[in-house]
Amino acid sequence: MSGSVITAVEKLETGIPGFEHVSVGGFPKGRTCLLSGTAGSAKTVFAVQFLVEGIRRGEGGVFVTFEESPENIMSNMLSFGWNLEQLVSEGGLAFVDASPQLDQELVEAGSYDLGALLARIEYAVGKVRAKRVSVDSLGAVFSQFSDVATVRGELYRMAVALKKLAVTALLTAERTEEYGPLARFGVEEFVADNVIILRNVLDDEKRRRTLEILKFRGTDHAKGEFPFTVIPGEGVVIIPLSETKLNQKSSTLRVTSGNDTLDEMCGGGFFRDSVILVSGATGCGKTLLVTAFVSGAQKQDDRCLLFAFEESREQLFRNASGWGMDFETMEQQGKLKVVCVYPEVMGLEDHLIRMKREIRAFKPTRVAVDSLSALERVSTGKSFREFVIGITSFIKHQEIVGLFSSTTPTLFGGASITEEHISTITDSILLLRYVEMFGEMRRGITVLKMRGSMHDKGIREYAIDGQGMHIGAQFHGIAGILSGQPMQISQPEIERMGSLFREELGE
Amino acid sequence: MNKFRLTLYVTGHTPRSEKGIRNLQRICAEELQGTYEMTVIDVLEQPQLAEDQKILATPTLVKELPPPLRRVIGDLSDTEKVLLGLDIAAVVERNERKGK
């Protein structure tokens, strides 16, 4: 051995959104990484994006294609905003076209190797001074030649050659099952140092894409599957959940809920950087509370962003004006932005990315989501939990006050799955509940939890009229409201209970 | 008279390259007496040519003329397959018939 100095594995920043976090800094530099996935798992997009981001950083890239023609790839990638043709003509990108030539029959007469392919790759790497190479895909080479043993040997030789060229290489390989063998034809055997798996799993009629770093030899990475999405105009965007660390600052600044009595109940309003969940059955006034919260922005010169997943902009504006609140003017003043979208139009990962983008662009000081449970419809339990954690932590980091509404599945009492996931993350929970008393439907509100503040512990009655919500006095002589089975307790009983505790306290 | 234009792509001076060249020379001498042009290209020296022709394997024999374009890969040790792959057998037969 020569007297070379052994150094730790360096990382190469890929530029793929979210990947640096999952991979703790990027790909192992100068090494070869296997990217394995089933058909339609976005391997090619990932492989192209890896090069495009490199070229943006001034690192040349070589794309070796065994499957699609360069022309096909160029036209497919236009939808992500990547003009590969231009990159080629500017000298940043080079293709090595090893796709099957359908017009030419190939006859094998004797033994052969893939020397020409290696020579072409080496030549292309030199031509654009490439730092990154993508090979898509290994399995397709096997379909072009009959001698599997030779091809495997030659691919091994290619992997060795790529290492010698000091490029960071990404080799894609297809697999037939989401949770089965790593790749076909045993190709994983010669690029076993670093393995990334892309999955596209059908779960409860919904597609869920995830990325998992199976191993990075000699260097660190985050463990487990991370959801990602493929967005037109952007490409692969990974959603790293562990990025959402619990390190947000805490503010003592209060903002109004838009309802004076509610502010009082909360000890003076919501905290600036808190997330509040409003839970209630259908028709009990959640949207009204959201509307009040939005118009509260006007009182405090805040900017509010409202994500509506249940009602259209027109409906929301009409409702607001019905309660004497003028959304139209707020919008004109630039204090309000309403984003209405049906939950079904995209996956939850896309919703999350879109919402983050809207928040970054509008820079609001308060965000309202009406309702979270509508989003629950379009997702599986797992991705919903990831979504809720993602959006709440993002909002808290921006020091924005967030108000989420959630519909309970039953009219009386009860909790929804939404609350199961979100209740421990949110700082405050407001419960709106129907109370059936003497053959009449009445409504009660309570502050179940208010982190870091004193708050009213009582369940108070409220009424809704043309002016909005009016919170009245505490329910007296009633027990079991939250369980959905209110019971009247007679006055002597209350007194007896009261005296019971006095005795115990030794008075 | 149909003249054959044949190009053989090889990688450096490896035993396999040498064998491919020898086999091609033998086949040409035996089957295409004098009616051919043969070029040998080393892809290590001229990678751009390999790129243009989209050559993957070496040795690769390309018959550019007469049409149709045909490719045979391997060290050409299987003469039958080379003739079949290049569609030479038919041409040779035809030439022989004309000569008679």
Image (tube, coloured by chain):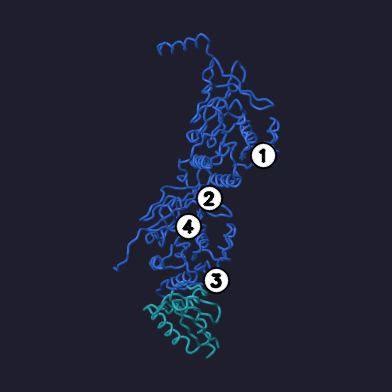
Chain colours: A blue, B cyan
Residue A296 against residue A144 in the figure, above or below: above
Q: Amino acid at mark 2?
A: Thr
Residue A229's mark?
2
Furthest residue toward bottom: B100
Labels 1 and 4 share a subunit: yes
Dot 1, crowdedness within 10 Å: few (<14), some or many (≥20)? Answer: some
Q: Residue at x 56, y 79 (%)?
A: B67
Residue A65 versus residue A231: which sits nearer the camera? Answer: A231
- Residue at the spot of label 4: A14
Q: Do tag 2 and tag 3 residues touch (Cβ < 8 Å)? A: no
| Residues beneath discs 2 and 4 located on the same chain | yes
Q: Quadrant of residue A464?
A: top right
Q: Residue at x 55, y 22 (%)?
A: A459
In front: mark 1 or mark 4? 4
Amino acid carrying mark 3 in the image = Asp
Find out whether the residues at labels 2 and 1 contact each other: C-beta distance under 8 Å: no
* Pointer 3 chain: A
The mark that comes first in sequence, 2 or 4, is 4
Q: Nearer the viewer, mark 4 or mark 3?
A: 4
Indicate the secondary structure of the residue bearing disc 1. Answer: loop
Question: What is the spatial separation of the Cα atoms under label 2 and label 1, in whole angstroms?
Answer: 26 Å
State the image coordinates of residue A331 (x, y, percent, origin top left).
Answer: 68, 40
Precedes in sequence: disc 2 or disc 1: 2
Q: Give the mark nearest the N terminus, 1 or 4.
A: 4
Q: Chain of mark 2?
A: A
- The local crowd at label 4, few if under 14, some if 14 to 19, many if 20 or more residues have their Cα within 10 Å, is many
The reply to the same-chain question for discs 4 and 3 is: yes
The kind of residue tagged 1 is Ser
* Alpha carbon separation for disc pair 1 and 3: 55 Å
Q: Which residue is mark 1?
A: A312
Subunit under mark 4: A
